[in-house]
Image (tube, rainbow, N blue to C red):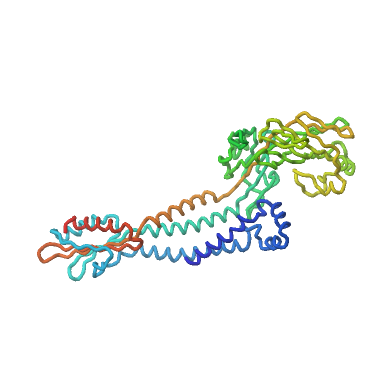
Amino acid sequence: MRTALILLFLLALAALPGALLPQRTLNANKVADYIAEHGWWGRLLDQLQFYNVYASVWFSAIYLLLMISLVGCLLPRTFEYVKALRTKPVITPRNLSRMPHHSESTVDKSADEVVAQATKALSGWRKVEREEENGARTISAERGYLRETGNLVFHFAMLGLIIALAVGKLYGYEGQVIVKADGSQEFCNAGVLPYDSFQPGLLVDGTGGSPFCMKVKSFDVNFLDSGQPDLYRANLEYQSGADLQTGKWESYGLEVNSPLRTEGDRIYLLGHGYAPVFTVTYPNGQKRTMDTQWRPTNQTTLLSEGATKFDPPGITNAEERRTKQIAVTGLLAPTARLHGSLLDSSFPDLRDPMVAVDVLRGDLGIDNGRGQSIFTVDQNLVDDGRLKKVARENLKPGGEITLDDGTVVRFDGVKRWVYLQVSHDPAQVWVLVFAIAIITGIGASLIIKRRRLWVRVVPAADGRTVVEVGGLARTDQAGYGEEFERLSGAVTGGKN
């Protein structure tokens, strides 16, 4: 038990860096910034796996040792408990007056009547009747075995919880995806590619996920006058299981604290934002419309930034195409507030949307085989002169910018998007069961008290019967005095 307590303390201590330091699985960019800011100290922490605490060698070692310690603690205690259950209550001590609780009475009843009365009073106790050499009859009784049962249930449940959490980390996964809230985009759980970010369990390869599809038909949001959100609801349509074959769609109102549960997965609503819609009309009359999501930079007013990127149509020469790619970057204000020519937002809802954009033309680097953020352009391309700013303007819906080559960029309006998380944990039900068992077990071990009681019945020479009762609380004695007085009174019939 001492070893288990030490390991529990070490486990809590080892979890502290996971709460104090950025974790790579949650925000890799923040980890990179932290390392760059702290120099050699940041790099040392990285080598020691402090940015991936819960998958580190040292945290896993403590976790495994705690489980081994629990098993080593529980097995002998379980055998002792089973042995104690099969053992009869101990023999009545020779001198009951030395017990913490003691009473002696002489009653006008026969020994048989007293024994029968004592047996009835001790209903529910484990008891055994014996006869001593001098003819005295005794009853040994014990109660409170469920205290140890609760203790064992608590520790077995803790062991089960550790195993269940480990199974969840091995076979579970979490993925985040941004979905347009106009019903035009359908998301299906078919591997890793549909997700914007994906964190698989150690034994998950990204295939074999729970089959379901969903789309967001609309998004309802209500803001208080202070700008604080009062209601988020994504109106989903989804299909799973047999519905995937029949094409039947079910409706669900997804809210922040009301996840959708289907096919063993849970779908959470994490947030929402805006996607400005831009249409680029090229000199040859061809048009391209894009509605790429922009990310909020101010969670209170939802002032957002992003980059909407266009590849020119009809140009097959790669070199020529890389000189005519267009990116519309800048800020989006749901409710515009201008400080001179500088754009800001005064409210998070779409009351008076406006964008402040820079139009860049040149090589966006979208076909060089390297991944890049959808929210920004590669600053290195700007620094190298391969991507140049050709226009800057503040636009309201319907506003246009005409470039020097006749290309027209129009701001058409704003669409909403929602940020969803899909979580799969095959052991989540067992985690709940073991958590309830932990509370039940520790409650029983704290409330129930072990106690013993002995009754010695000795026939007196005058035909009466001497009744001696002794009691012993094997745990905290608080409250046993009143119970002992009641039992001793019931045994003797309340007569002294």
* Farthest residue, direction front: 340
Question: What residue lies at 72% left-to-right and 54% top-to-bottom?
Answer: 33
Q: Can residue 249 be seen in this view?
A: no
Left or right, 140 with reference to 261: left
Q: In this view, does 330 lie above or below 485?
A: above
* Farthest residue, direction left: 462
Q: Is residue 311 above or below residue 73?
A: above
Q: Is residue 213 visible?
A: yes
User: Which quadrant holds residue 337?
Assistant: top right
Question: What residue lies at 77% left-to-right and 28% top-to-bottom?
Answer: 398
Q: Nearer the viewer, residue 446 or 429?
A: 446
User: Which quadrant is the C terminus positioned in?
Assistant: bottom left
Q: In this view, does 83 lie above or below 424?
A: below
Q: Which of 33 and 189 is in front in this view?
A: 33
Q: Where is residue 84 in the image (x, y as percent from the top left)?
A: 36, 64
Left or right, 217 with reference to 161: right
User: Which quadrant holds residue 222?
Assistant: top right
User: Which quadrant holds residue 166?
Assistant: bottom right
Question: What residue lies at 24% left-to-right and 69% top-to-bottom?
Answer: 95
Number of dots carrying numbers: 0
Q: Where is residue 45 in the image (x, y as percent from the top left)?
A: 67, 61
Question: What residue lies at 62% left-to-right and 50% top-to-bottom?
Answer: 173
Q: Where is residue 132 in the image (x, y as percent from the top left)?
A: 21, 69
Q: Where is residue 191 in the image (x, y as percent from the top left)?
A: 67, 46
Q: Is residue 336 above or below residue 56?
A: above
Left or right, 140 with reference to 427: left
Left or right, 18 with reference to 366: left
